[in-house]
Image (spheres, rainbow, N blue to C red):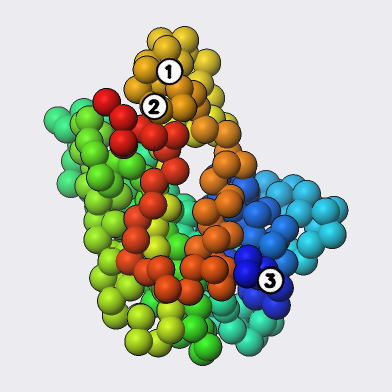
Amino acid sequence: MTFSLKGKTALVTGAARGLGFEIAKGLADAGAQVILNGRDGAALDRAADSITRAGHACATLVFDVSDQRAVDEAFGEIEKAQGGLNILVNNVGLRDRRALEEFSLADVSALLATNLAAPLYLAKKAAALMSDGGRIINVTSIAGQIARGDVAYTASKGGLDALTRALSAELGPRGITVNGIAPGYFATEANQEMVEDRTIKRWLKTRTSLGRWGSPEEIAGLAVFLASPAASYISGQIIAVDGGFTAHY
């Protein structure tokens, strides 16, 4: 029972595909009732169907995490339907790979609204529903710790790392732990073009300890652990799941 999430309710943002879906699936496999969030209702329905066909409880909530009114309404629905929330996974993130001189201030503000301000506001709303402790997990990036350009995205993920620590300090007295998962290079749909690039594949073979891309399902184990009773004394930590990328040179 150390890793059981039976009786827990979890909201996972950006859960229609990729790492978000794998995290939601992992939480469901561990016994949690999962609520999948995204902006594409049809994609969410397909993801939810996959989880329910495996015999797990699953629901969907379509809303944009950067829309405050939509977030308020969504959490109102969660409170009405579930009475509370035990686990929040802030997984939604935008990537904008452009050179510094190509960014306007409005571009940066839009990216920060989704990657940093939205997780902060969702954490606030979730904490209000966590009456008996809880778990908040922020999906950040190894770009929050190291950099090779990609200025706006890297800054947003560095801010999310700092937000994780600050939330941990503030919410700890209420029994809520806050931790971050920092993925490295994962072979998701969004990265398909890079995955098929032989030059990048050769580079990762020498740049990572394991010498390969990560498979999306390899993210789920850490999320389940951090959400479970096994991680009850872990808070404020950013844990990389990167095949040894940040430890290897």
Dot 3 crowding, Cα within 10 Å, few <14, some 14–19, many 20+: few
Q: What residue type is labelled 1?
A: Lys
Picture coordinates of residue 149 (x, y %)? Answer: 21, 31
- The answer to whether 126 is drawn above or below residue 146 in the figure is below
Quarter assignment of residue 36:
bottom right
In the figure, residue 241 lies in which quadrant? top left
Kind of residue at disc 2: Thr
Residue 239 in the figure: left or right of residue 195: left
For marks 3 and 1, give the one nearer the viewer.
3
Question: In this rendering, would 237 be left or right of 181?
Answer: left
Lower position in the chain sequence, tag 3 or tag 1: 3
**Residue type for callout 3:** Met
Residue matched to label 2:
208
**Mark 1 secondary-structure assignment:** helix
Where residue 109 appears, as percent x and y from the top left, is 25, 52
Image mark count: 3
Could you tell me how far apart the alpha carbons at marks 3 and 1 are, in whole angstroms? 38 Å
Residue tagged 3: 1
Residue located 31% across and 36% down the image = 247
Q: Can residue 234 be seen in this view?
A: yes
Q: Which of marks 2 and 3 is in front?
A: 3
Residue at image coords 61%, 78%: 78
Residue highlighted by disc 1: 205
- Placement of 179 over or under 152, stated as above or below: below
Q: Which of 35 and 212 is in front in this view?
A: 212
Q: Pick out the residue farthest to the left.
A: 101
Give the camera-side residue of 235 and 23. Answer: 235
Image position, residue 176 (x, y; %)? 43, 79
Q: What residue is at 45 percent from the left and 63 percent from the top?
A: 137
Asked if residue 60 can be seen in this view, the reply is no
